[in-house]
Image (cartoon, coloured by chain):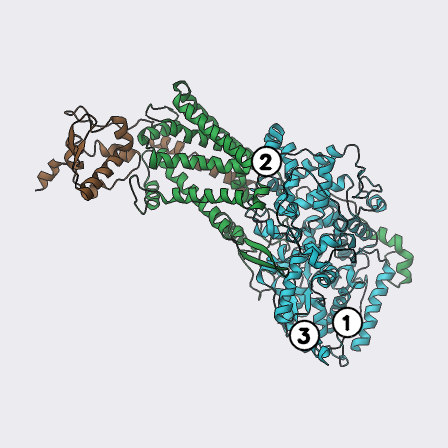
Amino acid sequence: MSDRGLIVGGLVLFLGLVTLPVWYNVAAGRTAKPPELTLPTQAKSCVAPVEYMRASHMDLLMTWRDDVVRQGERTFVGLDGKTYAKSLTGTCMACHVNRAEFCDRCHDYAAVTPTCWECHLESRQVQRTAR
Amino acid sequence: MNALGSLVLVSALAGLGFAGGQVAGLRPLFGMIIPYAAFLTFLLGVSYRILVWMRSPVPFRIPTTCGQQKSLPWITPSRLENPSSTLGVIGRMALEIGLFRSLFRNTRAELREGPRLAYGEAGLLWLGALLFHWSFLFIVLRHLRFFLEPVPGVVNALAGLDNFFQIGAPSLYVTDVLLAGALGYLLLRRLVNPQVRYISLFADYFALFLLLGIAVSGILMRYVVRIDTVAAKHLALGLVTFSPVVPEEVGPLFFVHLFLLSVLAAYFPFSKLMHMGGAFLSPTRNLANNSRMKRHVNPWNYGVPVHTYEEWEDEFRDKIKAAGLPLEKE
Amino acid sequence: MAEEAPKPEELAQIDYRPPGRDWREPAVELRKGTFCYSAAPKHLEYLGLPNPRPWQPFEADWKLPADWKQTILQGMKERLDRFRSFRLFMDICVRCGACADKCHFYIGSGDPKNMPVLRAELMRSVYRRYFTAAGRLLGPLAGGRELTPDVVKEWFYYFYQCTECRRCSVFCPFGIDTAEVTMMGRELLNLVGCNINWILEPVANSYRTGNHLGIQPHAFKDSLDFAVDELAEMTGIRVEAPINRKGAEILYVIPSAETFGTPHYYTLLGSLLLFHAIGLDYTFSAYASEGGNFGLFTSHEMMKRLNAKIYAEARRLGVKWILGGECGHMWRVVHQYMDTMNGPADFLEEPVSPITATRFEHARSTKMVHICEFTADLIRHQKLRLDPARNDHWTATFHDSCNPARSMGLIEEPRFILRSVCSRFHEMPENTIKERTFCCGSGSGLGTDENFEMRMRGGFPRANAVRHVRDKFGVNLVACVCAIDKATLPPLLEYWVPGMNVAGVHELVGNALVVEGEKERTTDLRGESLKPKEERAHE
C-alpha cells in the first residue's frame, strides 16, 4: 500500500514525540536528582514549618504583601511564637542570603518565574552596596 | 445510569489513587509500576491500533466532496473543501485537525409551525470541542517542565503565554480555566440534550469524568491544596530517566492525579479516544478527489461474474436482428 | 398506496423526544409504509445470491439460513480486513451527535435510530461485542451487543432506511460516512438473503438485459424511435439516435428511465436535440443501456458486475470516450469506483470535445465525462444558440443530487447551464444545497410505493426548502440531474408542495436551444404552451 510508509512514519513521529522527555534527558545526561540548596547557617527554624514553606511559601508572601501594602500590618507571629517583620528582603533573605543558591535553584528546576525581584532587592547587603 | 455509573467508577479510581498515596507500602506501586505499565500500554496499544487500521487497505477513492470539483478550467475549484491535489489534501486535513472544519458546519434543525423547518446556528459544540482539545494540548506541553531538565525556553514561553494575565501566585493558567469549562460544557451537553443523552454510552461519560478528574486534581494542586512541586518533578523526572523515586514530600492528591492519568493512558488505545489517530486516516477526508484523473488501485480487486456482450447477443439475437440493430455474429 | 398514507399535517407531527427504553434492545415496528418488501427468489437465483426463498419482512420468521450468525460475523471480518473505512468508522466515533439532525430521515421521522450515529451504532455494538477485546470481555458495559435475529431485523429496517446520501459525513468531525456503514450492512444482509425487491429486480434486469426495467434491445430501439418522432413533431427536425453503432466517437450512457419515464423522457429529448445541433458523432448502446447501478445498493461485487458493461461496450464499439447522462448514483459509481473496479480504460482516449477541442483533463483516466460538464463547455465557448425566453414559463431552482454533489463536486456546471438557459433561477437556502443538499428521500433503491410514508418523511427537508422558494420567489420548477430525483421528487412535492414540477437540466437546454432548420416552437418539450404559467392562469 502506498500509504503504509506515511502511516508508519506518522506513528514513529508520534511515538518519538510522546517519549521526547526520555531522549531529551538521555541527551542531557540527566538523572532525577533534585536541586541542592544552600541552607542558612545561623537560623535554626523558619517562620513556618518546612513542609508548609516548600509547598506554599508563595501564599505566605502574597498574604504578607497584601497585609503590608493594603492594611499596613507589618508584624507576623510565627508558629514558634516569635515575631517577624513581613518582609521578603528583610526577613526571608536575611537568612536565605543567596538568591541564586536558594530561591533560583528550585524555581529553575520547576520552571517557575516569580516576579518578586522585579521590585524587591535581593538582600540588605546588596542594598547597602548600591547606596 | 451510564453517567452515574461512570462517575462512581472514576470516583472509585480517584479514591484508589488517594489510598495508593497514603499507604506507604503502595506508594512504589502507584508512583512507579503503574505509571510505567500504563505508559507502555499506551505506546504499544496506540501502535497496535494504528497498524491494524493500516493493514486494511483503502480499496476505493471515496472523499466526501464539500465544494466544487476541478473540472473545466474556467470554473474555480474549491481547493480545500474538494481538493484534487496532495497540497489541497494537506490543507484540508490541517483545517480538519487544527480547526475542526467539519464540526464548524454544525447547525441545528428545528421544526416550527407550518410545518416549517428552520436551521439555526449551533457553533457551541465546535467551540467547546476546539477549546478543550487545544487547551489539553497546551497543558500537556506545559507539563514538559516536569519531565525535562533543564527546562527548554519553549516550554517556559508557553507557560508565560498561558499565564498572560498574571493573576495570583502561582499565577492562573488560562488553559486550566478553558479546559475545565469546555469539559464541563461537553458533559452538561451530554446530560441535558435529550438526543445526545440517548446515544451516550458508559464509555462516553467515563472518558469525560476521567478527564475531569485529572483536570480537577491538577487544578486543586496548583491553586488550592498546594503540593511540593519540586518533589513532584523529582518523581516525574525519575520516571523518564529510568531512575524512579517516590519522594516522601509527594502527597496523596498528586497520586490521584497520577493514577487517573495512568488509567487514561492505559484506557486510551482501547477506546474512542483513538479518534486522535483515526482523524488522520479517514478516507473521506484524506484522499484527493482525483479519481477520474488518476486511477486508484484496489489491492484485492478480484474478478467477478459478468453478463458478457456475447451472452447478451446470444440471448436476444432474434430481437436485435428484427430491430435492425447490428450484430457481432449473424 | 399513497391514499392510505397519513396526511401531510399528520406526518409533520414529529416527536423528537427519544423513547425511554435503551436503544440497545433491538425493537423494530415494521409498520406498513415504512419498509420495502423482500426480493423475489427468482432474482436471487438468477444472480447467484444466497438464500433465495419466499419471505416478507412483516412475517415473524425470516427463514435465515442455519449458519446465519457465523455467515454474518465471517462477512464482517472479511469486510473489516478489506475496507479501512469500515474498520475506522467502527472505531473512532465519539458520539458527539453533530450528525443527528443532519439526516433527512431523522428530521422527518424523529426516530432516534435514524440519527446517523445510532444507525451506525446498530452495527458498532455488534462489532464491539465480537471484534474488540473489551467488548468480548465486558459485553454491554463496553457497549457490546449480541447478534440476534432481532438485530438482523433491525439492521434490515434501518439500513434500508438510509439513502447513502453522505450528508452526515459532511458534518462529522472525522468524516464518518454512514453510507459506508449502510453499504456494509446491506452486504452483510445480502449474505443471508435479506434484500429488497425494489433493488434486486432492477439489478437482475440490468444484469440480463442491460437496464433496470428489463427493456430488451428491440424495445429500447422503439423507445428511442418514438422520441425521435416526437421531436420531429415538436421541432420539425428529425434527429438521429444511433444504437450499438461501431466506430462512433462517443458512447452515450444514460439512466434507462429516460427512455420511458416522465419527466426523465424530456431530458432525453433535450439531449437528442443538443447532439443533433452540434453534430455529435455518438451512439447509444442497448447492451450498456443503463448508467444507473443498483449494484451500489447491494454490494461492491454487484456494483462491479453491472458496471463492467460500460467499459466492455466502449471497447467493443471502438469509441474514443464515454459521455454520461443525468443520473445521481451512476455518477458516484463512475466517478469513485468504475476506473478502480473495471479499469484501466487504456483502450480509450483522453476525452476531447469534438466541438470546442476542450480536453477534459479531469477525466483523463476514467475517460468518462458528465453531460453537464460537456454542455457547460459548449455554452461557455458559445457553440449553442440559446433562447432563454422559451423557459420563461418556468421559475426554476436547482436541487443538487446527493452523489454528484458530495461524491464528485458537480456544483457549478449545472448552475452555469441553468443560468444560461432560463432567465428565472433562484437558489434554495444555502443550508439545503450544494454539499449540504438534502436527499429526495428515495435514493439508494428505496423509491418504491410500499415505502411511501418513509419516503415522504425522508423527503420532508427537501420539500420544505422547495416550498420556501416557491413562497418567496414563485419557483414552480425543480431542476435536477438525477433519474431517481425525477422519479421520486414529483410524488414527494405533490405531497408536501402541490403544483411543483420537476425537470432535468437538459430538458431546459432542449427548450432553449435554437436549432438550425427548426420550425417556430409553440410548446416546450413537454408539449405545453410556452406562455408563463401565471399568464395562463390569469387569462
Give the residue at mark 2.
B52
- State how far apart marks 1 and 3 are (Cα): 21 Å
Q: Residues within 10 Å of mark 1 (few under 14, many from 20)?
A: some
Residue type at tag 2? Val
Q: Is A103 on the left or on the right of B157, as rendered?
A: left
Residue C171 to residue C145: above or below: below
Identify the residue at horizontal 68%, vertical 39% (top origin).
C79
Checking the image for residue C384, the label placed there is 3
Q: Is C355 on the left or on the right of B121, as rendered?
A: right
> Pointers 3 and 2 in contact (CB under 8 A)?
no
Residue A25 x %, y %: 36, 31
Residue C515 x %, y %: 73, 77
- Find numbered disc 3 in the image and state the secondary structure of the residue it sits on: loop
Identify the residue at horizontal 31%, vertical 26% (top origin).
A33
Question: Can you tell which chain is drawn cyan?
Answer: C
Give the residue at mark 1.
C526
Identify the residue at horizontal 24%, vertical 35% (top origin).
A60
Chain letter belonging to callout 3: C
Question: Can you tell which chain is drawn green?
Answer: B
The quarter holding residue C256 reads bottom right
- State how far apart marks 1 and 2 are (Cα): 57 Å
Residue type at tag 1? Arg
